Structure formats: C-alpha cells, structure tokens
Image (spheres, grey):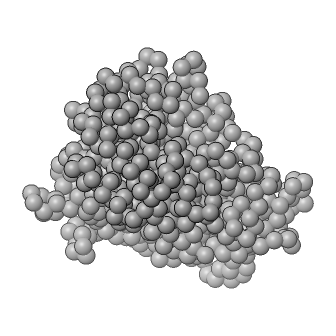
Amino acid sequence: MKNTYPRPQFERDHWINLNGQWDFIFDDNNIGLKEKWYQGIDMSHDITVPFCVQSKLSGIDNSEDHPIFWYQRTFHLDDITGNMLLHVGAIDYLSDIYINGHHVKTNKGGNVSFTVDITNYLLENDDNLISIRVFDDMFDIEIPRGKQYWKEKSENIFYTRTSGIWQTIWLEEVPNTYLKRVKYIPDLSNNSIKISYYFSGDIDQAELQTTIFFSGEEISESRVIVEENYYEAVYYLGKYNDQDVKHFWTPDDPNLYDVTFKLHSKNGDDIVKSYFGMRKITIENGTLMLNNRPYYLKMVLDQGYYPESLLTAPNDDAIIKDITLTKDMGFNGVRKHQKIEEERYLYYADKLGLIVWEEMPSAYKFSSKMMHNLSDEWQRTIKRDFNHPSIIAWVPINESWGVPHLLTNNREVHFLESLYHLTKALDDTRLIVSNDGWEHGTTDLLTIHDYESKESVLKERYKTIENITSSIPGDHLLFNKGFKYNHQPILVTEFGGISFQKTSKNGWGYSTATSEKDFKNQLENVFRPLYQSTHVQGVCYTQLTDVEQEINGLLTYERDPKIPVDDIRKIVSGNTFNNS
C-alpha cells in the first residue's frame, strides 16, 4: 500500500490515508444509481487502492470493457474540530463521490488531483461510508488518455489503459480558516522569493508567520496580519546566492529552501511545511539558459509505466530507483511522456535533482468536446504543479495528436495557438512547446522527433541550420503553414528507440540491436552526430524502459540495465566522443 504523504510540497501533520482494501463491483447494467448503491451494498470484489482496475496490484487485473463500476469503504472519525478535506490524486475518468449517501462531488478528468470539503456530511464518533461511482469509456478518444489504448490488448505505441482510482486518496483535517495554497516565483537577480498566499474561510485579522530555512538555518522570518483571502510578499534571502555562495537549484546541486507557514486565527492554527527552489529557465539570444548560464539538456523519454501497477508507481522506492538510474546513466532530465505524474514523483525530482518536461496526455479526435476536456485538465495541472523547480517546460500537445489536420484545418491551428498562449499566460516563467515533434506553430523551442538510425544521415541533417529546418523526419513538416523558424533553440526530443531483447518477451523498436556490443555501437551512432552538431542544444533519447510490447528501453520493463550503466553514462555524457 502507498502510505507516504501524497503532497510533500504542502504538508500538514493531520491526515488519514484511505489507500488499501475497498469493496468493488462492476455495474455493467448501469443500475447502481437507480438502486442507490451509494447508500451501501454488499459488493462482490475487493480492490487494492490506489491501483487501477486493469493492474495486477489492484487484485482485479481486468482489461475488459466495464465502463461503470463502484468503490466503497468506511472510515471512522472521532471529534471533528475543523474542516475535513477529501483529496483524490487521480480517478480515471468521470467520478461521483458520495459521503454517507450524499453526493458531494462530480469530477471529470483522469489525470490530475481534486479536493472536496466533506465536513457537513460526516458523522462524529462513528463510521462514515464513502462511495465512488466511476465511468470510463474505453472507446472515447475525445478525452485526454495519453498512451491508454482503446482496445483490450495493447499494441504498437499504445499500452494497457487505466480505469478508476490510480493515485492516493486521503483525508486531511484543517481549521475553519486555513491556508489553501501558495505560489512561489523566484527572482535570482535580487536574491528573493515572491510568495502568493490563498486562504479559505473567515480570515478576520489572522496572523501569518512565514519562516524560511536553508540547510536547517533560519534565514528569514516574518509575521503579518492578513485581512483578505489573498496576500503576497517578497522575501530577501540574504547572503545566500550572493557572489560565490550560490544556492540555486540545478540537477547537479538541487538546493531547496524549506518553509514553514503558520496561520493563527480565531479558528485555530494551521501549520504547513513546504519548500521551494531558486531556479530560472530562459532563452537569451537563441541560447537555452539555466540560472543565466547556457545549459545542454540530456533527457530521456519516460512513459512512467510499471509491470504490475501500470501508471501508478508501486511505492516510493520505485520512483527513487527510476530517478537514480536516470541520473546514473548520465541524463539530467526526463520528458514525462503522455502522463501527469503524481506529486511524490515531482518531489523526488526536486529533491534528487532531475529536470522534468511535463506533457499533457493527448486526446485523438478533434472536436469542441476534446478542446474543452483537454484545456480544462491542462489548466488544473499547471496550477497544481507550478511550484516544482524541477519542471522547466510545459508540453500541451505531442506530434499533432488530437489536432491531426493542422495543415488544412484552421480551427486546429487556432486551438494549438490558444494552448501556447494560455499556458504562457498561466506561467511565463517556463518554456512552452505547444506541439512537440513537428508542425510547430508559436513555440519557445524547435523540437524534432527523428528516428533515423544511420549516423551519416544524422550527421548531414544536423550539420547546418538550413539542413535542420528544411528536413522532414518522419514525413512531417517542422512548422505549420504561416510559421517559420525564428532562431529558437533546437532540440531533438525523440530519437534512437533501438530495440534490444534482453528477456524472453518479444517486441519492437525503431531499429534493432542483436547483441550488447551492437546495442552499444548503435547508441553511439545516434548520440554522436547530435552531440557534435553545433546547432543542437538538447536531446531526449527514446526511451528509459521497455513498456509492454516495446523493447526499445535502456532498461528492461523490470528496470534492469541492458548494458552496464557506466557504458551508457559514457555515451550520454559525451565522454565517448570527447565532447560534453
């Protein structure tokens, strides 16, 4: 069972983990609402939450078409002195939450967290019943589903889908007046952090105390009386980051500042522990910069799938292992492909030092419904994950998925442009790649997907700017009609994909290696010309692990390296080519 605090960047002491065994039943005849199952019934199965219905760890392990199903369990509460919040990491796709037979929330969207105040529906000193009805249409391609296949068996580039609860569900007690969220904006030039505060409840002359620490040493403390539900302040970080003493966040040196917030009101005290990183990502004169220095991105594509639990990491150790192996192999970042990661993954990326590109799972049919579904979840994602220093780029669309007719459909172009500008409006501190891979419109980076395996072809293709911008890898134009290259940094954000079978399971890749020696040679052949190009400022190798029928990972699905990690590191670091 996953039992660690699900939101470590905004942590309170008083919480109840609802993961574990729940009652479960399929509702194939859609009779649950009519028969009021939300009031409690005998259910035919047990399921282990937070693992999805299709996964082995859930205990259900069923990939058949069951669009409607129910969960239920009880939990006991003693005295309730404030508000009780129900937090849900993610439920795929449409969920209705009931507490003691009362409907409290409908949530649409299978990729991002949501919260509901259930205080008024609870029983004190008694058992409480929570029931959840889920609807997930396996055939609906107008919803953001990423790599989740619309068939029972995975094939090609698509994998087993995810239905139901797949991230931690938990309760948290807060006072009637509490700190709802904060927003951090670092200012490296002035050694300061701007914090925006959002409160809930009757604020009425509450005292807000903010204390900032670095390595256990208090460096800033302030107390202020707040009178409205929004407040912002700028805190100077003193000697830190001055001159030669730099405590910026980088993958090599992931410095984090700890923060304690204490809100004292007539309704009690709300204490929250948090952290932030001083990190800046910009483009200066066509050069990608991290903390005002040129920075070369060496990333790997990470699908975030696990053999027995699919999209859900089985535990924290699995997350740490993935990040540690990624760094040990010489990469400084990951492109999380078609997945919004749980907050504990982002916490470990922040803490251990790993750059993250966060990418919205795609829908596959363009329509008004699709546009609404995708943009709604995307905005919620940006709001939730804004504070993580590890995230340096947002990617709302990949390879024109969901907008397949950009060259002929102006509505699709307008939607793609709107996603870029909406994302930039919500967060102008990060880079935006509106359509990763090809058919770019407005974009901060020119990103290219290129699975060419011949070194000579790659060397010639990336030799000059003219060669790069006129190339058509994968038979797709790099820009939409009406758009052209405008000196953006160039990155090859998918390449390689070399299949190498190390287990008994067959599969495919974009090219094939027959032995460890051949695999190593082919890796060198695709990395070398990109590293030797003077115009490429970053790469993303496909991919970190094998996934189901794909065997094109550097690691097997079980996370075993296919060749020695040191050999991979020499290639990824560039040392093999006398170029770093």
Q: Nearer the viewer, residue 545 or 299?
A: 545
Residue occupying image coordinates x 44% and y 69%: 320
Residue 524 shows in this picture? yes
Could you say where residue 9 lies in the image, as x and y percent from the top left? 41, 64
* Residue that appears at 68% across and 64% down: 55
Residue 375 position within the rendered picture, expressed as x and y whole percent measured from the top left? 56, 39
Q: Could you say which quadrant of the image residue 347 lies in? A: bottom left
Figure quadrant of the N terminus: bottom right
- Which x, y percent locates residue 7? 48, 65
Q: How many marks?
A: 0
Front-most of 216 and 357? 357
* Image: 534 above or below 102: above
Q: Where 347 sits versus 461, above or below? A: below
Of residues 231 and 187, the one nearer the viewer is 187
Q: Residue at x 64, y 36 (%)?
A: 364
Foreground residue, 418 or 334?
A: 334
Q: Residue furthest left?
A: 243
Q: Position of residue 154 (x, y in %)?
A: 69, 50
Q: Name the residue: 69% across, 72% down.
A: 48
Q: Quadrant of residue 100?
A: bottom right
Left or right, 221 with reference to 302: left
Q: Horizontal placement of 136 versus 376: left or right?
A: right
Whether residue 275 is visible here, answered yes or no, is no
In the picture, measured across the screen, residue 130 lies left or right of residue 356, that is right
